[in-house]
Image (cartoon, coloured by chain):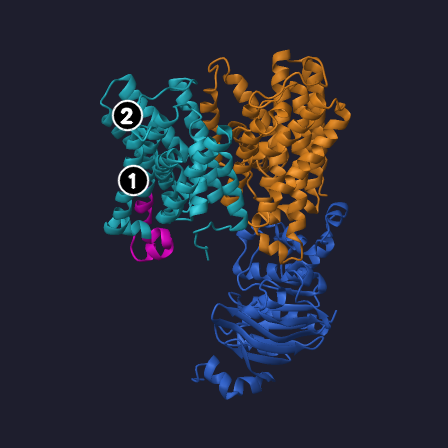
Chain colours: A cyan, B blue, C orange
């Protein structure tokens, strides 16, 4: 029981971080970035390359992963999203194609086989006989720190408020002098950073392989759809629902079924409540 | 071709807002009625309720005595009532002829597949609203607002309605185009079509209608001959702000 | 129906070319063509649903997989002859089409696309866990009966199937139903405002698409003789199908066929230079650039060039 609680909390924190970058784009840019998973992929491999192959310090590896993620986000916005001018279907299709391209690029550079990422912080702690890898603990703590920082950022900085304004009413924000293109570019950069950092942790949680982008994408999709657009609170709650259900399913029923609940959640919620559980209805 | 349309104590609430507040009226077969009122009076809501695009909170709509209230929008169109939209909604990637074709289709897969399009009737409909032969192959992106209204009109006529609801058919049209559409409406009136027309262009509206119904905040203020309705003090207050 | 003489001429040329092909190319290339034929069938199926009605399916392998697995299980475990199992598989796939239709009655756009993606992933996971004794679990099934022996026969079967499907769908979509389905993709409310029941039209599109997907999936399995979940319910598979339809030109039936051939040959041509999955790097980049440049595909570019030539 305690084991499920601890594992659930650790995993859910990570899922919240994964979903946050995705929901940012969905709420500010109003588009689904199906290439979101490739930030995680790129982040994981960047860390692997610098920290493990070149032997740079681990925090430098995480930092470089963040930089790569931000660059990818900005590039994607400038090259794909902006030229397509809010054509949702076109953005989704192009980002899906892009995801496959990035995956192929990774295979091209690093090969097809999966890599083991050395834990960011080695060692295992114990709470009442339950093993807690420090690495997972750090991942959860960092996730929470980032989430709180993001919350404060969105409320107290100028650009954060501009982001919130654009997410609520893009036209109104533009009319009142907010440079929506700049806000969007910034959001894509942040989203890429979050995704790439989440990727480092996610890869050390599971393993690093070229197809690693699909599962986190589905998790992000589930969290955003069920949690509603642009709701940090909803994102947190649903990340915990998804995380705990995965842990419960895999430890009590069967490990192979751990993802099934997530799919059923997506399908069920979208059919029953097309705007999500906590979502606001688009007028 | 004629039919009577009857609206009975129609209520529609949006939350606390009464968009339609117990409205009742009747259009006799072959009659043409203007529906007038200020912005937000509920004219377009009445159209949407008649077409089944909105469900009334209570009340009923009948066409020639037959209950429409439970029917879907396509079923109401099949029954013989059809509308145009204030903002034209063409199918942007297909030609004028094909846009009209969609309105002419039977509502059965078999019918659509087994019989080809009636090019002659598509052409006649297009010409009757004022398109030229060359316009048939143009796509909506190449059309002016006036052309889009004509297309909207033609597609509505294609569904073979007995009662037509026209929502701001003259908005954005040139004087020539207004005259053309007016002539078309007049000739359809002679053939017995029943009309309910919303227009801000009262000058263009007046010759097209037998009588007028004035509404405000979802309620009827008065109805009768156009001149009498326009002379009514309550109408002047609400509609013209008392200034005219 | 709007048929012109040059339509017949082009079809006759195209079909004649395809049927004469085995005399001119090697067996290896022929195998590539077989794959192109099946890809064309899947892309046609996607086009009928997503290209026309705008309900983008990111989970088309869900439908293909139902067809493939149904006939595989029936022939392998229940000794049902192929002549029986394929029709049953097609019916089962159409039932799957109804499952995909249900969300389409309530949600559109991005959300619908996501549901189809989730359906595919769900299928992928369930196939491995539920009754692995029947489905073969993670490894899938092999040793299934094959319909033909040798590349030439396999080619003729696949090309016949593809041509029959392409031609009949092309003819079907040139009737008024094609116009009505396109209209749904452009403005659903206006279709309903023209007196047409959109539920019925969507149902038709989904069933027609599922029919083609089931047929393609079932025949494909009996060509390969095996089925594996990772190869089938894969995002790369979705990608290949969608890109084939998009590159060729959606909502045209002919476009997806051209796209499927174009892509298969691109892959084949790149094989000597990039032996592994890296080919997708070039392949995807070309697809992305082409899609950004002309979202309506090769066929649109071709007709544009043709029009310009005629005007000279």
User: What is the span of residues highlighted in magenta in the rendered image?
Assistant: A165-185
- The residue at which mark 2 appears reads as A120
Residue ID at (70%, 14%) = C152
Q: Is residue B130 visible?
A: yes
State which quadrant residue C64 falls in. Answer: top right
Q: Residues within 10 Å of mark 1 (few under 14, many from 20)?
A: some
- In the structure shown, which secondary structural element does the residue marked by tag 2 occupy? loop
Res C108 seen here: no
Horizontal and vertical percent position of residue B244: 45, 84
Give how far apart the Cα atoms at labels 1 and 2 are. 17 Å
Q: Nearer the viewer, residue C154 or C103?
A: C103
Q: Chain of mark 2?
A: A
Which image quarter holds the N terminus of chain C?
top right
Report the residue that reaches farthest toward the front. A128
- Which image quarter is the C terminus of chain C in? top right
The subunit carrying tag 1 is A
Q: Which residue corresponds to mark 1? A: A144
Q: Is residue C137 above or below residue C175?
A: above
Quadrant housing residue A206: top left
In primary-sequence order, the first of circles 1 and 2 is: 2
């Amino acid at each position: 029981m305690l084991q499920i609680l601890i594992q659930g909390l650790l995993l859910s924190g990570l899922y919240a971080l994964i979903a946050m970058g995705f929901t940012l784009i969905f709420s500010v840019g109003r588009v689904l970035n199906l290439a979101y998973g490739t930030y995680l992929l790129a982040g994981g491999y960047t860390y692997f390359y610098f920290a493990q192959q070149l032997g740079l310090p681990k925090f430098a590896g995480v930092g470089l992963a963040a930089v790569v993620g931000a660059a990818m986000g900005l590039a994607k916005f400038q090259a794909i999203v902006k030229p397509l001018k809010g054509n949702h279907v076109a953005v989704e299709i192009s980002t899906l194609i892009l995801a496959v391209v990035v995956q192929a690029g990774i295979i091209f550079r690093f090969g097809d086989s999966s890599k083991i990422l050395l834990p960011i912080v080695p060692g295992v702690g114990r709470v009442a006989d339950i093993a807690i890898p420090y690495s997972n603990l750090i991942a959860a703590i960092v996730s929470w720190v980032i989430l709180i920082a993001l919350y404060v950022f969105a409320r107290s900085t100028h650009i954060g408020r501009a982001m919130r304004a654009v997410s609520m009413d893009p036209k109104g924000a533009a009319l009142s002098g907010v440079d929506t293109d700049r806000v969007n570019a910034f959001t894509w950069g942040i989203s890429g950073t979050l995704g790439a950092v989440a990727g480092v942790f996610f890869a050390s949680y599971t393993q690093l392989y070229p197809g690693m982008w699909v599962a986190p994408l589905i998790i992000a999709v589930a969290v955003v759809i069920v949690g509603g657009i642009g709701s940090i609170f909803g994102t947190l709650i649903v990340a915990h629902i998804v995380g705990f259900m995965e842990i419960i399913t895999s430890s009590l029923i069967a490990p192979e079924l751990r993802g099934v609940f997530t799919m059923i959640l997506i399908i069920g919620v979208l059919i029953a409540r097309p705007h999500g559980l906590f979502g606001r209805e688009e007028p | 071709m004629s039919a009577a349309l009857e609206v009975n104590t129609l209520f529609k609430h949006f939350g606390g807002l009464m968009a339609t507040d117990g409205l009742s009226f009747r259009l006799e077969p072959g009659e043409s009625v203007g529906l007038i009122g200020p912005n937000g009076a509920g004219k377009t809501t009445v159209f949407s309720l008649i077409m089944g695009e909105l469900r009334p909170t209570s009340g009923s709509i009948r066409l020639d005595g037959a209950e429409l209230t439970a029917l879907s929008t396509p079923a109401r169109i099949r029954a013989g009532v059809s509308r145009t939209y204030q903002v034209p909604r063409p199918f942007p990637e297909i030609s004028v002829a094909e846009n009209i074709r969609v309105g002419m289709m039977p509502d059965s897969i078999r019918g659509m597949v087994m019989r080809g399009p009636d090019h002659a009737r598509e052409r006649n409909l297009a010409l009757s609203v004022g398109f030229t032969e060359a316009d048939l192959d143009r796509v909506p992106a190449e059309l002016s607002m006036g052309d889009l209204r004509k297309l909207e009109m033609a597609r509505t006529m294609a569904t073979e309605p007995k009662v037509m609801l026209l929502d701001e058919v003259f908005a954005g049209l040139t004087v020539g185009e207004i005259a053309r559409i007016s002539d078309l409406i007049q000739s359809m009136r002679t053939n017995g079509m029943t009309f309910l027309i919303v227009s801000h262009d009262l000058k263009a509206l007046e010759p097209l209608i037998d009588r007028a119904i004035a509404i405000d905040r979802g309620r009827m203020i008065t109805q009768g001959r156009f001149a009498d309705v326009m002379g009514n003090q309550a109408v002047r207050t609400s509609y013209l702000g008392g200034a005219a | 129906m709007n048929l012109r003489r040059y339509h017949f001429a082009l079809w006759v040329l195209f079909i004649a070319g395809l049927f004469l092909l085995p005399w001119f190319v090697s067996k290896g290339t022929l195998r590539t063509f077989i794959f192109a034929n099946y890809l064309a069938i899947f892309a046609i199926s996607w086009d009928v649903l997503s290209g026309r009605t705008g309900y983008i399916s990111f989970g088309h392998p869900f439908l293909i997989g139902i067809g493939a697995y149904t006939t595989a299980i029936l022939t392998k475990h229940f000794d049902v002859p192929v002549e029986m199992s394929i029709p049953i598989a097609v019916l089962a796939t159409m039932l799957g089409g109804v499952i995909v239709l249900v969300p389409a009655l309530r949600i559109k756009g991005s959300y619908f696309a996501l549901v189809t993606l989730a359906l595919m992933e769900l299928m992928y996971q369930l196939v491995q866990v539920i009754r692995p004794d029947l489905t073969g679990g993670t490894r899938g099934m092999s040793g299934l009966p094959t319909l033909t022996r040798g590349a030439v026969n396999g080619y003729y079967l696949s090309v016949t199937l593809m041509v029959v499907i392409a031609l009949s769908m092309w003819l079907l979509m040139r009737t008024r139903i094609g116009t009505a389905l396109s209209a749904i993709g452009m403005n659903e409310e206006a279709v309903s405002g023209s007196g047409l029941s959109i539920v019925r039209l969507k149902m038709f599109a989904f069933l027609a698409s599922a029919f083609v997907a089931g047929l393609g999936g079932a025949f494909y399995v009996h060509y390969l003789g095996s089925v594996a979940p990772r190869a089938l319910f894969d995002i790369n598979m979705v990608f290949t199908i969608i890109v084939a339809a998009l590159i060729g030109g959606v909502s045209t039936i002919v476009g997806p066929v051209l796209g499927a051939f174009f892509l298969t040959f691109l892959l084949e041509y790149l094989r000597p230079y990039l032996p592994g999955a890296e080919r997708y790097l070039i392949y995807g980049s070309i697809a992305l650039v082409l899609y950004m440049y002309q979202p309506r595909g090769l066929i649109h570019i071709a007709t544009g060039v043709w029009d310009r030539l005629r005007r000279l």
